[in-house]
Image (spheres, rainbow, N blue to C red):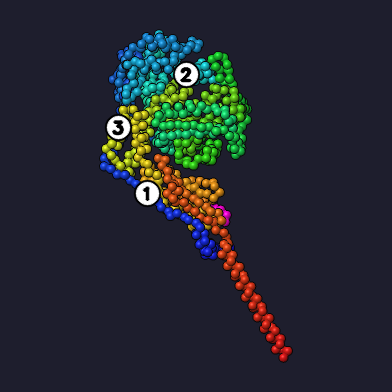
Amino acid sequence: MLNKTTRSFLCLSLIVVISLFTTINPKTSLPSTNATANTFELPTININQTADMKLAFLGIPTEYINQTQLTSLLPKTIKQFAYPNTITWTLNFSFGFTPFPDNISDSLTESAFHSGSTAYLNITILDNVLSQLPDLAIPERGYLLTFMSIPNVTGHSWFYIQERPDLFLNRTDYFNDVPFEYWIFPPNFGGLRRALYFDISETMQQSPTESSLTSTVRILITKSLGDIFTSLGGSLDPRWMVADTQKYRDYNVRILWLNGTEGQTPINLDQIRASFESLMPWTHWTATIEAEPADKPLNDLIQSRTIDLSTALNYSILLSNGTQLTIQSQQNVDWNPYENSGENDPINQYFFKHVKEYFNLTDLNDKSVIPVILMQLDNHTAFGGSFQGGVSWFPYNVIIIAFQGSTLKDLGEIGRIGLMHLLRHEIGHWVSLIHHSFDFASGYPKIICSMRSMTNEFCAFCKDARARISFISYYNSTIELLTKKQTKTTILQDELNNARQLFYDWNYNEALNEIVAIYYGLDSTPPNISNITQTPSQNSVFPEDEVKINATVTDDLSGVKRVILNYTNDNGTWNTIDMTNIEGNTWNATIPAFPYGTNVTYTITAEDNFNNISTTQETGQIYQYIVIPEFSPFMILLILLGTVLLISIARRKINSKKQEQIVTRKTKLV
């Protein structure tokens, strides 16, 4: 076979003909503009701040608390978030003492739920009535910690129910005969507002000394600070720093329900949207769910890791009306989310590798799309030793939840509510929220939050944490963009100062609305696409050739988010390929080989991180090439002419030789 150089030379005539019928527009790069104005000094954020910590003692006389000693023993500072976004808080403690109002004590007693010899007081009512007391007002820039001794109530505990009291109140769950009760709370709790409550009634009934009660209060405060100034995922794993600082206005939760039934969704999508728009009011959320069968390789993997149990797992629920619901597991899928958070588990690894094709994702760096695998197993198969389990892996771009089929079939609404709470919890991890404390027996408070309790809401502490780090991220990125753009007007300076002051005043939602508007208003210029080249060149593409396309794509402000190569072979269908950033500003993609005579047209589209889009087609840059045959008509003609010429020469030689032979014979005869 001839090499490409020879073939190209032989195809010169055909190329000339093709060029007469093919118009390829000149390659011009999009202009980029940089506005300039008067400059000013860019203000930075002061991340050394003060929190006013109001200690309210309700029904506890002043003589029981040594204020001077307590203040000296309490932490003076606490750090929140991982470097470089660490906020150092100076804690400013103040004291207030108020008798416990009789009307509040009466309200709690009258609304109590009685079970056996215990009166369970309602946390929601407590929070509502105490919020109306001027002496218990939450500081504008801080938190309220209330220590209570409730009169005329003995042998009491606490309960919290947000939804469906008929399904949760006075309910006992059993897992392998071990009972637990979601609705009962320990004496230390809070989070509905920027407030915690510590019920020390039992301690007060034992006539404590000043020293002992002061020590008890110190321990409770110290143990609560980690939940109040909760950190985010980046403090536990450096890979989650990107989750800490994520900046998106729009989120889309995409749930793939494997082995699910279309039209019978177990997830209330509106609740998911509402929960996260309440957590992050500067964002907008949508959620969708699709059901489809699991693929064969996944089924084979699940089957290979499924074992028969010698003793069945039992999970049962006893409702207050005496109804008992039970599910059993005869088999269990070996799944381990505990070792390295399940990073090396084969099932998780499978989803890590296939999430892109499952959800048809084009950009794995776009974390505003939240892919959720919701895998339904058969009715008697547990997952990881439980009837449901889940893990959120932001670095691998997927949330994985699996559940025993009988969770829906036999538990009904209770099963659906449980799945909803698990899903909300795992998406909470996606936006970098972490677990609250759980060692309640040693004095840690139970936080009313989706990261610890059965509730639709996230606590005030998580809301503050998420808002603080989001503001820092947006603000620093805004300053970075302003430095690049060099557009700094007095009006913009006022807006930045206002946003920063709102942040210092703990008006986090207003501060974020302000800084988000500034941030996204900075870059309205799409990326610049230039220097488009292809290999082989437009006049040298043969049927076996793949065509490599390179382009230079730049965006001086927000940066290039993605680049797409669009191509068609004149069949009316456009295909897309994600281009790869191979070096610097150079992006690359490959068009597959096509047969002889195929007319290929391609364009390039680029998007920046502010969703500004440019395409070569808009600027008249449409690129084309035609696949050249192995043997062109001109080459075939040359071969034919050469063959005819060779035959003619051969015939002449033969005829000449015959003539010589005839002459020789005649000579001999003479």
Pointer 1 or 2: first along the chain: 1
User: In this orientation, does residue 284 appear?
Assistant: yes
Depth-wise, is mark 3 or mark 1 nearer the camera? 1
Label 1 belongs to which residue?
Answer: 31
Q: Residue furthest front?
A: 21
Q: Is residue 372 above or below residue 604?
A: above
Q: In the rendered image, which quarter contains the N terminus?
A: bottom right
| Circle number at residue 161 | 2
Q: In the rendered image, which quarter contains the C terminus?
A: bottom right
Label 3 belongs to which residue?
Answer: 498
Magenta stretch, residue numbers: 592-596
Q: Is residue 157 above or below residue 509?
A: above
Classify mark 1: residues with Cα within 10 Å, few (<14), some (14-19) or many (20+): few
Q: In this view, does 463 lie above or below 568?
A: above
Q: How far apart are marks 1 and 2 (CA)?
A: 60 Å
Q: How far apart are marks 3 and 1 (CA)?
A: 34 Å
